[in-house]
Amino acid sequence: MEIGFLGLGTMGTPMARNMARAGNTVSVWNRSPGKAGAVVEYGATEVDSPAEALRVPISCSALADDHAFAGTVLSPDSLAAMRPGSIHVNLATVSPEMATHAAEALTGIGVRYVASPVFGRAEVADAGNLTVLAAGDSAAVEEVAPLLEAIGRRTWRIGEDPKQANIVKILGNYLIANALQAMAEATTISEKVGGSPELLMNIMNDSLFPGAVYEGYGRMISRRTYEPTGFGLALGLKDVRLARAQAREADVTLPFGSVLEDVFIDALAHGQARQDWSAITEATRRRAGLTGDTTA
């Protein structure tokens, strides 16, 4: 396939690389220069503008948030470059409202929109084992299925309404955020009473909570090792706020949501913006009177 890819961040780079590795002709663009090398070495071509990456039958984006997506993919220059009949696949977590707006804007120029956020950290993306969600026009989803197979171990088809894929992703991330805070609280108690946070999490992972979230993040939290960043604190705060907004719209109370928002803000206020979102643990430790440097 001939595709364009916008956004070569922590997740975008391995996804674009795997698409190129699968034999597709890939044009890549990134706002900050110098990140394309890891994809170009697999045959991709770096282009100078979003419009160049969008002037293809299938384009993909993995941009940080609503603002970045709207300012890049939905800009006047980008919309003018996109071909009627083409498909755009948004691999990022955006708000349900943005998914609806994007679908309407692109449909208006004859472009089909597929919302396809993913679950998995950078190392999972690198291995091509992401859990992929896909919602949008069924024919468009079928057409891009080989690309989604190149980046993931399984694609879940959520339906024809693009926003539903983003709702599933937001709720999944909300569940992870709750797990992070639960582990932060449990390991902080263990540390304060003279126990071993790492042993605690090893026991939990071996018995009660086997799986990627508790094992992977439990190791980071118990060792207080929050770098390299797989998913940043600011992105975690964004997704907690998206979950709270969705709850308000659905008239559902979300009492843990306000607690999570507070600990994310606390962590960011203490200069932890470059750390993984599991670093919200430090907010709980500070409130418990514990101090000490974290390890990279």
Image (tube, rainbow, N blue to C red):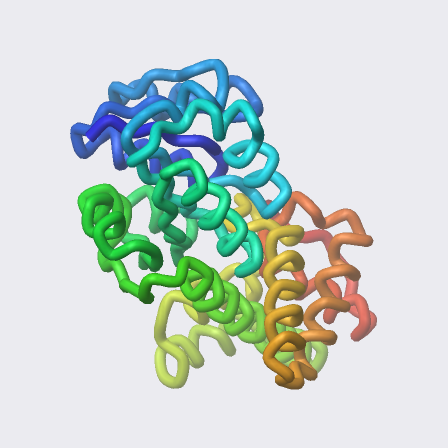
x and y, in percent, of residue 53 in the image: 40, 24
Q: Position of residue 172 (x, y in %)?
A: 47, 69
- Above or below, 285 relative to 254: above
* Image height of 285 relative to 72, above or below: below
The answer to whether residue 128 is seen in the rendering is no
Q: Is residue 36 above or below residue 181?
A: above
Q: Residue at x 30, y 19 (%)?
A: 41
Q: Position of residue 156 (x, y in %)?
A: 28, 63
Where on the picture, by quarter, is residue 107?
Answer: top left
Question: Residue at 74% of width from left, 58% of height from top?
Answer: 267
Instruction: Judge whether residue 286 can be spotted in this image.
Output: yes
Quadrant of res 195? bottom right
In this view, 235 is above or below 285: above
Which image quadrant: the C terminus?
top right
Work out whether residue 55 or residue 64 is closer to the camera in this orientation and state it: 55
Quarter of the rendering occupied by the N terminus = top left
Residue at figure coordinates x 39%, y 85% from the top left = 208
Could you tell me how many numbered marks the image carries?
Answer: 0
Going by the image, does 229 lie left or right of 185?
left
- Give how far across and how far down residue 295 sits, in percent: 62, 49
Q: Residue at x 34, y 56 (%)?
A: 136
Which of the pair 92/114 is nearer the observer?
114
